[in-house]
Amino acid sequence: MDYAFAFLAPTLPSLGIAIFGITLAVIRGPRHPAVSILAGVGCFLIAVPPMISLWLRLAIFREATTDESIAVFGVTGAISSVLGTVGFGLLVAAAFGWRSTSRQRSQP
């Protein structure tokens, strides 16, 4: 259990913010559905990889050889990177993509 906490502790702030983002997306969903879906899915994709990695570390270290562990962690690292990048992209799209570009400025 100490190993699990030692691995998870550095990610707790970002996990907390991701959970807060998911909560806000659910609360604001009826008011801004498209933005809320993008933000909620983005936060979820950012929060999931550390949890999967922790689960794999706890499961693999008990039974796997060193070579198997290296292969699994290489693949999960690549997948985690892709999921985090997609999640961040969805957050950027939620923040900036919904604004219309056809606003006209009022002239003095």
Image: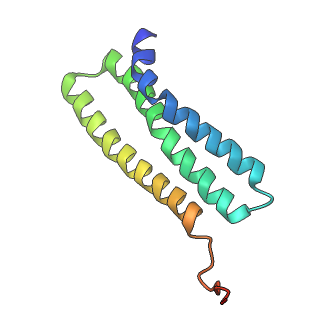
Q: Where does the image place residue 38, in percent across and percent down from the top left?
A: 60, 59
In-front residue for pair 23/106 = 106
Q: Residue, x 74% and y 62% (percent of image)? A: 32
Q: Where does the image place residue 52, in percent across and percent down from the top left?
A: 46, 34
Q: In this view, does 54 lie above or below 83?
A: above
Q: Which residue lies furthest to the front in this view?
A: 108
Quadrant of the image containing the C terminus? bottom right
Q: Residue, x 69% and y 50% (percent of image)? A: 25
Q: In this view, does 11 lie to the left or right of 99?
A: left
Q: Which residue lies furthest to the top in this view?
A: 2
In-front residue for pair 56/42 = 42
Q: In this view, does 5 lie to the left or right of 91?
A: left
Q: Is residue 60 above or below residue 44?
A: above
Q: Which quadrant of the view contains residue 73?
A: top left
Q: Residue furthest right?
A: 30
Q: Residue furthest left?
A: 67
The type of colouring in the image is: rainbow
Q: Is residue 94 above or below residue 27?
A: below
Q: Which quadrant of the view contains residue 56?
A: top left
Q: Where does the image place residue 74, in percent across and percent down from the top left?
A: 26, 39
